[in-house]
Amino acid sequence: MGDLQCFEVFTLFPDAVESFARTGLLGKALDRGLVEVRATNFRDFTTDKHRSVDDTPFGGGAGMVIKPEPVVRAIEHVQRERGPMHRVLLTPSAPRFDQRAAEALAEHDRIALLCGRYEGIDDRVREHFVDACYSLGDFILNGGEVAALAIIEAVSRLREGVLGNPESTQTESFAAGPGGAYLEHPQYTRPKVFRGHEVPPVLLGGNHQAIAAWRRDQARARTFALRRDLREVEPLSAELHVAVPASVEPSAEWVEVLRRHDVMALVVLGTDPAAVMPWVQATGGRIKVVGFPSLAQLRRRLRQRHGRKPASIALARPADLAGDRPAGPQALTDPALLLDALRGPDGEGPRSAIIIAGLDPWGVDAEAVYAPAGSWTDGHAPSAGKGAQTQDQTLATGPGIEDSSRPPALMVVDLGLAGLLTRLENDG
């Protein structure tokens, strides 16, 4: 890959392309010799006195079609004059251009962008004279010039030296990472308070670890609310334990949950050995039931076994979500979002996990708090029923400016603990 990246734009409106290219960071990159943008007019390669580039479509129909002759002549002329190019046709009938496509195009030193007009360019150009086709999105433009300029901006900024801070591309929306990509976290600047709206306090405290964790949580929440398709949520292949305090008495629902799912063991927390026996009797000995003096000791044992801290999922009642809560993990109601949160920044996921029930969900040092929609029937045991409700998520991070491009309200399924374990073990 050379130092200079050249974009050859084939268009009926070269002035529009060249004028835009002289602005902003792209213009600065042109001045510094990092990027070059050249525009070639199809009309310069016509042969009739009217410089006609279009004609009526064979088979009839509305509109006009750009003829293949001026397009191919223009491509061949530029290749003879300035060298080979990676030739890209811009058309709605093509795969969608995205950040991965931008990264692939950035590997080419010379890129040709063919801008159609009217009903498009004769398809023989697509079939025999280009290397790739892209669409800017699921909408129709009057021509390909805007799409070409968008691609030039997206690709050129990936070249070394074009951006002032190259780390910007690593944390912005659509940057590739474990499990796919995230939308970028919210950004704020001065003043601290604007018309009564304050900047989140965590950003002002100077704790860089807390800020990084907050940004990860916000990016994850925003992505799952607005662009869930960006995440590839894998099943959690972890050794699962369910931990309950000795004060929780066995119930038919708990026993059914434990019998139906591949739980390594039910752990009764406390120092009273007699608290284990009711669970052994209730499960008929079909499930391993063990006692541990404390949750901390259980965590230490699992860490010794797997060489890594176990993930802790605190199971909360919906009522626990109301009111003020101490600072800590984000409350989640979506199993896929929960799985993604447990994978951590490295994307590997835990080797063991503990689902904790019957304790204060914000007082157990959990990585995630899961609060399935619905209610628990007896104050401790989860409802095994599966209902559904809608949750309005105008923005992923809370109320504010409405995003008119968002999809309809997302469905959040009331899975209960039974459904949670199914999703953890099976389909993520």
Image (spheres, rainbow, N blue to C red):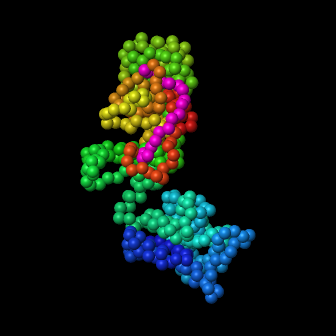
Which of the 4 image quarters holds residue 25? Answer: bottom left
Magenta stretch, main secondary structure, is: loop
Magenta residues? 379-396
Residue sitting at x 55%, y 77%: 12
Is 322 situated above or below 344?
above
Look at the picture and state if 78 lies above or below 170. below
| Residue located at (40% from left, 26% from top) | 298
In the image, taking residue 207 as reference, residue 163 lies left or right, namely right
Residue 86 seen in the current view: no
**Residue 283 location (% of width, % of height):** 53, 16
Considering depth in this image, is 408 or 351 the residue closer to the camera? 408
Q: Residue furthest bottom?
A: 49
Establish if 362 lies above or below 23.
above
Residue 90: x, y in percent? 57, 67
Residue 416 in sight from this viewpoint = yes
In x, y percent, where is residue 346? Answer: 44, 45
Q: Nearer the viewer, residue 306 or 410?
A: 410
Looking at this view, is 268 or 89 the one in front? 89
Identified at 48% across, 53% down, the residue is 405
Please tell me which residue is depicted at 57% across the width and 35% down the height of the picture. 426
Residue 45 position in % (x across, y down): 60, 83
Q: Quadrant of residue 291?
A: top left
